[in-house]
Image (cartoon, rainbow, N blue to C red):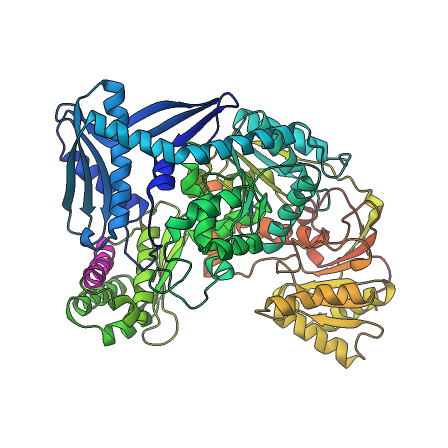
Amino acid sequence: MYSGPMTEFTVSVRDLVAFCHRSEDIDHRYTPSPTAEQGMDGHARVYRRRADSYHREYPVRYRHQQGECSLLLRGRADGYDATLGLVEEIKTCRGDPARIPPAVSRLHLAQAQVYAAIIAENEGLASLEVRLTWLDIDQDQEHPLSQHYQREELRTFLLETLARFSQWLELLQRLRERRQASLRSLPFPHGEFRSGQRDIAELVYKCVDQGGQLMIEAPTGIGKTSAVLFPSLKAMERDKHEALVFVTSRTVGRRTAESSLAMMAEAGLRACSLSLSARASVCLSPGSACHGDDCLYASGYYDRLQGAMAEAVQAGLLQRETLQDIGRRHRVCPHQLATDLLPWVDIVIADAHYVYSLQPLVGRKMEEHRRWSVLVDEAHNLPERARSMYSAKLSKSALMRVKKHASGPIKKALERLNRAILALQSERCTETAQYAILEDLPSPLVNAMADVVAAVVQRMGEDVRFPPANPLLMDFFFSLLQWLRVAERWGDEYRLELDPGEGRQGLILHLNCLDPSRLLALCHSRAHATVAFSATLSPRDWMRQLMGLQEDAVCRRLNSPFSPGQLQVELETRVDTRYRQREASLDLLAARIGQFLRQTTGNCIVYFPSYRYLHRVLEVLHAAGGLQGRQLWEQYPEMDEVARNGLFESLHRADNVAAFCILGGLFSEGIDLPGDLLTGVVIVGVGMPQVGQERELLRQWYQLRYGSGFEYAYLYPALQKVDQALGRVVRTDADCGQALLIDIRYDNDSYRQLLPPWWTYQRAVDPLP
């Protein structure tokens, strides 16, 4: 948004028009829209039909002076034909564009008028034809809407638009000057830098300055969040970039970033930060549909939006409660308000989905004219999270359920899809080998899925009541869309798995992304700079490759600010916890854990690789007399927030808690338990992923691609979980504690060398109990 001198603003034509010309209601009644790839393909189809004199993606620039403020408008008209005197805006859709709300078409036409006004002004043209063309991608049919304008009409429209924008521009200018002044004098929020924090800050500032990529591994408790945010904000004052997005993978990461920004605000920071929340968590009218006929906050939303936005950008820290308060005062939807604020705020705190998914709300904004830098917290989680976002499943049982109740063209399309699936099963599966893996994507299957989508879209166009009246079909429809969306990204790293599942109709079509690096690299390319940081990013080549960072990305591992003596780590290599030996060593394991809990004071967490193993050990301990002198807390599957908070409440109330938890789960990373809240951990096993078809596919791919199949699929992810759990104990300079790692494999150098180098590891020598 900002560039050059302090008084100059750069705004995209799209953002200008959206601010000035949207009106009426929010209407989120589902209207099927093409994917980004389908949209680009649709544009290409239209371009092929145009004359040689037609210029696609025609760049426009227009400078407007308003008092002491200079506004640079930038954008790209979809098409300009100087010979025909035509400016064209192309939009793709599915189905009859007559179903699209008139306010949406007016908005797109206004965008085309602004492009035309700039072109007419810059090139001295007397008049232009302004055309809005809707392309129905399913029917490959164009629906044009054209109007002729004289140059003076277009100029008047542009100046009126800029006049509407003038008050907002003046507010932005005041806020920018206030922000820049606050950044110039902003002190580090914790006073002096701790050991290691200054190194982080210098690396981050250089990365933003150079528009590069940086991967930082630094111990837990060092204060990485503040050390990354502070230099990024300082770089904003020097015009190195215009906006930040702090990417989190867990709620605790979001809260830490919010807390750090709140401390900076207390120290004088005057910037606008926005925390994005899921629609359901911020909604003021639960149960209402997202359109003006059903929701008070959607009705007339755009007519009241500017007042709400003016209050919001001056509020400083925009968290969920603040957005809800503004929404109530202005009677606007808080979730949509957050979306509309994205072009104008300084900092965004968001889940990885908003930046790295196949439909990234923030990622799309990063493709526009502002320079965004991305700060990825707990970056070791990104590859697996991305694999999930870039994969999709479709069950045959769901197809059969919706086919049973369908009729007409939809039923016929579903039957064709069923036949395509049966043909694929017959070709690739046998009675003895019902599970199959395909390295190619069968076009008959994809075409049959697309036919179902087209049939449903056609029916939705005929009757707006169809979607709410057919919830089961719509759920299947959305699953189909996601499957096709993933299929469009198909590459060498994908496999199509035919999983027989359970029962006669249990087949699951699994589009499995084995390696997210290619698609993550595309996401990184949108950013001005990318900083990925975590306590566990080793080995560095493994993490850099899977995160899709460039080969020339700067990778640094910082030393620990803590003394090695603050955590006494003992390796118990005489107990075999490998899967096939667990029952045989169960009594010895339980006795060793009991011995550690008796000899260690304070709260402890015992981590297990599975719930079954955890329960078996507890059974043995209870049979032997229980955990004398210890208060037991036990993790169980699918805990809600209240239940999860039970652990923290127990640790705050007592000093003798023994919490039995899952390694790699909610309580083994991302939680901060300083001081006496936690003084000891026991880690049972090495965190090795369970051997199975999924993990073996990964091993084969990593061996083929990187020559390190076992390491990338099993060993490195395993020890990463161990390292995270070890990091729960020492969080400050005053913390001390003990850790016990139990497994014969800790006697192996290839395992032990992957443990954090800043602690000292001693093999257990005392007699076993």
**Residue at position x 49%, y 41% in the image:** 706
Name above or below for residue 171 compared with residue 610.
Answer: above
Q: Is residue 268 visible?
A: yes
In the image, residue 134 above or below residue 682: above
> Foreground: 338 or 447?
338
> Is residue 449 one of those drawn in magenta?
yes
- Residue 537's quadrant in the figure? top right
721 is within the stretch colored magenta: no
Quadrant of the rendered image containing residue 632: bottom right
- Residue drawn at x 66%, y 28% is 202
Q: How many marks?
A: 0
Q: Position of residue 417 (x, y in %)?
A: 22, 64
Residues 76 and 42: in front is 76
Q: Which portion, as a residue range, is magenta?
A: 443-461
As rendered, which of 140 and 88 lies closer to the eye? 88
Say whether residue 430 is left or right of residue 548: left
Q: Which of 510 and 128 is in front in this view?
A: 128
Q: Is residue 516 visible?
A: no
Residue 263 coordinates in the image, percent (x, y): 69, 43
The image quarter in which residue 53 lies: top left
Residue shown at 79%/67% (left/top)? 653
Q: Position of residue 423 (x, y in %)?
A: 22, 64
Judged by its main secondary structure, the magenta piece is: helix
Residue found 18% across the figure and 60% down from its top: 458
The answer to whether residue 654 is left or right of residue 237 is right
**Position in image of residue 316 (x %, y %):** 59, 43
Quadrant holding the C terminus: bottom right
